[in-house]
């Protein structure tokens, strides 16, 4: 698969202080970062989440975080069947404490965008260049590629304390497939902007 480089949208995410509990509680979090959007991500819960960062996570990255769908409270999840391989499926799955394939780190690029890095594998959230620009284009994990725009993302504030995530390469939004949403393994892809729909909102 051909890979072209990508860039990420402005947002300085500061970690808020949250109590850790045995069962994750995914309610909207206060957002207190100092950038113009005022957005931050929810720290991952679980005993391991405060452990030393893996060697494949860059020193400047913040995290780990959960990224959950406002539609059904499922978490952005890397498929363990293929994790570590380029093209690993990114899906929705029941949020589970300690599942490090659901943990994400956020790294700010030189131009102020974001790269999202999976804690388990060190691979980056990546939009498939073979069909990017089309509704339904695939989002998967890929090895980090310096400067490519299909690995760079922009966050923008949405309603109810949530945010939307768009690809810097195409301007499309991270979108949970409504055909099977609510099932573990439901597809996450890119779609044109649709105002007010919760399957394009995250927290």
Image (cartoon, helix red, strand yellow):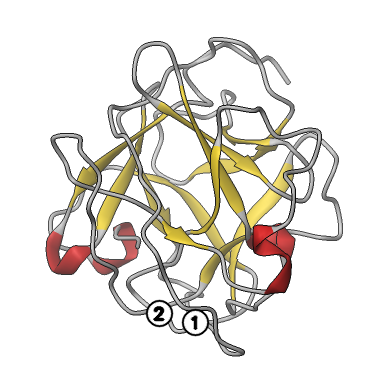
Q: Who comes first in sequence, dot 1 or dot 2? A: 2
Q: Is residue 4 above or below residue 46?
A: above
**SS assignment at label 2:** loop
Q: What residue lies at 65% left-to-right and 77% top-to-bottom?
A: 97
Question: Which disc, if any, is residue 72?
Answer: 2
Q: Are marks 1 and 2 in contact (CB under 8 Å)?
A: yes
Q: Residues within 10 Å of mark 2 (few under 14, many from 20)?
A: some
Q: Quadrant of the N terminus?
A: top right
The quadrant holding residue 124 is: top right
> In terms of depth relative to the viewer, which is nearer, 17 or 87?
17
Q: Is residue 140 above or below residue 151?
A: below
> In terms of depth relative to the viewer, which is nearer, 60 or 117?
60
The quadrant holding residue 146 is: top right
Q: Quadrant of the C terminus?
A: bottom left
Q: What residue lies at 85% left-to-right and 42% top-to-bottom?
A: 84
The residue that disc 1 covers is 182
Numbered disc in front, either 1 or 2? 2
> x, y percentage for residue 136?
46, 46
> In terms of depth relative to the viewer, which is nearer, 193 or 41?
41
């Amino acid at each position: 698969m051909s890979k072209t480089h990508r860039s990420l949208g402005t947002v300085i995410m500061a970690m808020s202080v949250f109590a850790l509990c045995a069962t994750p509680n995914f309610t909207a979090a206060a957002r207190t970062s100092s950038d113009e959007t005022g957005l931050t991500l929810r720290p991952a819960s679980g005993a391991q989440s405060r452990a030393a960062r893996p060697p494949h996570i860059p020193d400047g990255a913040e995290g780990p975080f959960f990224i959950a769908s406002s539609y059904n409270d499922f978490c952005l999840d890397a498929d363990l069947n293929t994790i570590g391989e380029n093209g690993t499926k990114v899906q929705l799955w029941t949020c589970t404490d300690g599942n490090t394939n659901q943990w994400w780190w956020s790294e700010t690029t030189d131009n102020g965008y974001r790269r999202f890095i999976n804690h388990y594998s060190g691979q980056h959230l990546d939009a498939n260049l073979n069909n990017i620009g089309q509704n339904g284009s695939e989002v998967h994990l890929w090895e980090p590629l310096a400067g490519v725009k299909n690995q760079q993302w922009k966050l923008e504030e949405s309603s109810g304390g949530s945010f939307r995530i768009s690809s810097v390469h195409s301007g499309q939004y991270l979108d949970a497939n409504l055909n099977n949403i609510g099932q573990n393994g439901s597809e996450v892809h890119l779609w044109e902007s649709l105002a007010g729909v919760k399957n394009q909102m995250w927290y």
